[in-house]
Image (cartoon, helix red, strand yellow):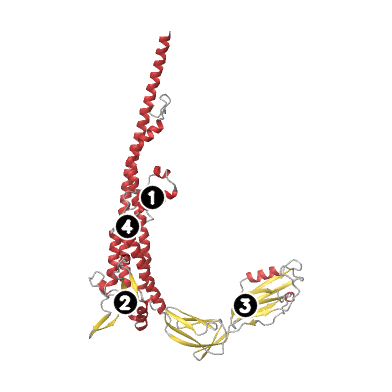
Amino acid sequence: MSNIKLSGMVSGLDTDTIIKQLMQVERAPLDKLMQQKQKIAWKRDEYREMNTMLTSIRNLADKMRFSASFNKQSATSSNSSVITATASSSATSGSYSIQVNKLASSALVAGDSVSVDSIKSKVVGDGDITFKSYQGSVEKSVTVNITAGATTYEEVIKKVNAANIGVTLSFDSVNKRFMATTTATGERSSVQISGSAVSQFGFQDMTSPQKGSDAEVMVNGKTLTNANNSFELSGVRFDLKGVSSTATSVTVAQDTGNIVDQIKSFVNEYNSLVDKVNEKTKAVPSRSYLPLTDEQKESMNEKQIELWETKAKSGLLYRDDILTDTLSSLRNALINSVSGLAFVSSGVKTGIDNLSDIGITFKKFSPGMTGELGKLELDETKLNEAIASNPDGVMKLFTNSSKLDPKDKDYFKESGIGERLYSTLNTQINKIIKRIGSNALSDAADGSQMGIQIRGLNSRIDVVKTRMQAAEDRYYKQFTAMELALQKLNSKGSWLTSQLGQ
């Protein structure tokens, strides 16, 4: 009987609507819990956004704490149409005088002109054609059998090129001739063509292979030959582009532009972080704007929902302890000098031990510009001068390694700026992860602070939903009982009326 629902069959009442309205009162605690859960989820997303930003700066700091990032070399050619150069991390500074007398070339065999309009044409005679390639003592070959009137020139080209023997067969449609070239260059690379069908392609039956030619260069007065148009020397790769009658100079020096770019990138990312943290921690919460319930969303359009939720999300990280501590810790890491890198004698400072020595300072207070407080400003002229005059000093400012135990109170003072930043950011990122957990974990397995909060809310939500279901069942049971009672009453009324009528 408890499962029977008589929705106004006797009374004429809209029982479903009445119960739905009654359930709105019962639903209020559930809506409140769902709103709390939504705010935690939004807050977790805000933390994840900040963690992404912190991780980006940490990756930059990770590079800046190693000397390899500051020791990059660049190679400059006085004539890039003749030779270009690329310096590796192992390259040493210096200069080279290079004259290119001859470029390395592939072995080339060009056939005579033939009466072929298209490579799709069929070969006239039977026979075979063999292509051999030699790379030093290594020999490779491919033979293609030809059936007159059936095999096309295109099929022969495809079979030769697909054989991967180091020979490419092509057709010059302008001059109506076939050409075979080696994919490798140099005198050790050669090609030979033979077979009964060579004349069909305009070739001669070759008794000896056709060789390529080596490159010939003079490096600092010494003549070198190379099988190809590239060679390496002292960590520098040289690529030959053309022949010259005069020497081309190549200069290898420390890539100071790379150092400047790294430091400028860090300053820009740090200032963006300051803006974002200030935006998150100084935005006052709009307490009158709570997360919308499903019923509230049904009565609003997408634009209204978007505007409402923008206000509801505002101030979720207002005065957040982790983010404010992050800026404070980073400022401390940046503003303090690195111990042991400089000394003062007779009032004159020698060495670089502070960011201000290379033109990086914190912005001073300016009326109406409070949003700029805490940001860095860069004097690029001073930075370039410091790099030009003391590149090792600039490098050590960021990469200096303390010999003390990391637990020693002076370890941080002796560590370079790069190590300080990396360590500080790592600590703050881990704090956020401890608070919000990992994306890879489900709510049931998440042991973070917010994970525990969400798990507790889920349990309370389940309890409230169970209670709501019981209340709804009770309401339907009561209304069903009323309908049955009215039905009995109506039956008795009808019987009494009929008796009185008699």
- Say few, some or many: other residues with alpha carbon within 10 Å of mark 2 (under 14 / 14 to 19 / 20 or more): many
Would you say 435 lies left or right of 209 here? left
Would you say 145 lies left or right of 282 here? right
Contact? badges 1 and 2 (CB < 8 Å):
no
**Amino acid type of disc 4?**
Ala
Among the 4 quarters of the image, the one containing residue 322? bottom left
Marked residue nearer the N-terminal end (2 or 4): 4
334 w.r.t. 249: above or below: above
Return the residue at label 4.
Answer: 283
**Amino acid type of disc 2?**
Leu
Would you say 206 lies left or right of 463 here? right
Residue 14 location, x and y as percent? 41, 30
The CA span between labels 4 and 1 is 16 Å
Q: Secondary structure at mark 4?
A: loop
Closer to viewer: mark 2 or mark 4: 4
The CA span between labels 3 and 1 is 69 Å
Return the residue at label 1.
Answer: 308
Residue 245 location, x and y as percent? 56, 90
The CA span between labels 1 and 2 is 49 Å
Closer to viewer: mark 3 or mark 1: 1
The CA span between labels 2 and 4 is 36 Å
- Say which quadrant the N terminus sits in: top left
